[in-house]
Amino acid sequence: MTLTDSTGSRHEPLPDIPLPRHRARLVVLGVLAGAIAAALWSFTFVDSVIGDNVANTLLGHNAKGTAITGVAAGAIFAFVSGLAGTFTACNVAAFGAVVPLVRQGDSWHHRLGETMRPLSRLAVGMIVVSGLYGAIGALIGERLPQLSTATVGDGLPVRLIQASVVFGIIGLAFIWLGLAAIGLLPDPLARLERRFPNARLVVLGALVGGFLIGRPFPLFHKLFAYAAQTHNPLYGAAVFILQSLGNVVVMSVLFALLMLVAKGRFARWLAAKPSRLATVTAVAFIVAGSFTFLYWDVRLPAMFGYGWYPTAGW
């Protein structure tokens, strides 16, 4: 069956996946949820109250105020600061990537295995991107906008411009994948997935790893500056990989526990009606993508006088 969207474009839906009804409503509600989250999000609370306190507690000292001394200390700081940044605005969209990982299983060890396998493929893409960027950052870090202290216009930091560009692209990619899941856009990964069955998970992992390319999180900025001072690409790759793994460890544990505690009920619920998986996948990607794009490309510029976006007063 060939679909025609509101622009008259024709494209093929995902094969053998019944499409949900009221797709336009799903899109509107998903975008609205992402927009509300972007308006209500408190970066001060998440970055400082949660992030700093988690890092300070795990490290046993002031994470921001204490210098990184040595290779081992930098490696520990990388993982801990990644863990502390789990719920920052530059990482929370990763939770939208786990919905396609839902698997069924008859026993707890089978469910655990079926959960860990896709997570490992997600990790492959994430490690490749974060490691490569870490190596590049260690070599030329001082010349990257992400480490710049310069500002433009009404005080907009150059490093936030890089964040806006990177997260804008990732947000749009998530939205595209969400629309493709319900047949409103062609699936950019369908052909690749037919040739390489695990390609979709690796690409999702690469998008999650790409969060580091734009991340302005102060603790990550401190780690990046230290890695750049070493000019050691292997060390840069290693600490960026640890940072990226720290970012997703909580998400992975929560997802694994959900699959174990639910005893496959969620997976069976999705499988009971074939269009449910497409619906849940689409909503997860559209909400995560809309939040990411609107927060970094509409709300962020508005904070410096470029446009307007409603913001909660906390």
Image (cartoon, rainbow, N blue to C red):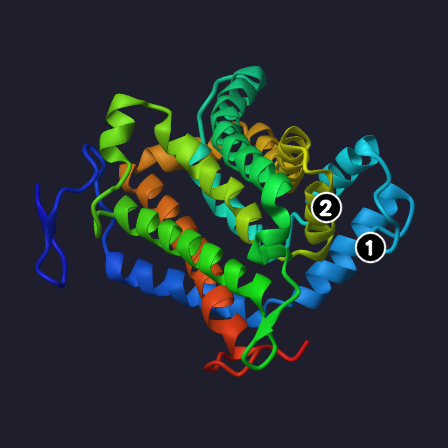
Q: Which residue is mark 2?
A: 223
Q: In the image, residue 164 lies at what x, y percent?
A: 49, 62
Q: Secondary structure at mark 1?
A: loop
Viewer-proximal residue, 164 or 176?
164
Viewer-proximal residue, 187 or 114?
187
Q: Please say if the residues under marks 1 and 2 sit with CB atoms less than 8 Å apart.
A: no
Image quarter (top left, top right, bottom left or bottom right) of the C terminus:
bottom right
Give the residue displayed 62% in from the left and 57% down from the top: 216
- Visible in this render: residue 128? yes
Image quarter (top left, top right, bottom left or bottom right) of the N terminus:
top left
Q: Secondary structure at mark 2?
A: helix
Q: In the image, residue 277 lies at what x, y percent?
A: 35, 40
Which label sits on residue 210? none
Rendered view: 107 above or below 150: above
Rendered view: 233 above or below 82: above
Which label sits on residue 64? 1
Drawn side of residue 72 relative to residue 228, left or right = right
Q: In the image, residue 238 lies at what x, y percent?
A: 66, 30
Q: Quadrant of residue 49?
A: bottom right
Q: Counting other residues with Cα less than 10 Å from the Cα at mark 2, is it few (<14), some (14-19), or many (20 or more)?
A: many
What's under tag 2, amino acid-wise? Leu
Q: Counting other residues with Cα less than 10 Å from the Cα at mark 1, is it few (<14), some (14-19), or many (20 or more)?
A: few
Rendered view: 14 above or below 292: above
Rendered view: 211 above or below 35: above
Give the residue displayed 57% in from the left and 82% down from the top: 154
What's under tag 1, amino acid-wise? Lys
Give the residue displayed 38% in from the left and 44% down from the top: 281
Q: In the image, residue 219 lies at what x, y percent?
A: 73, 52
Give the residue displayed 75% in from the left and 56% down from the top: 50
Viewer-proximal residue, 298 or 104?
298
Q: Earlier in the sequence, mark 1 or mark 2?
A: 1
Drawn side of residue 229 relative to residue 154, left or right = right
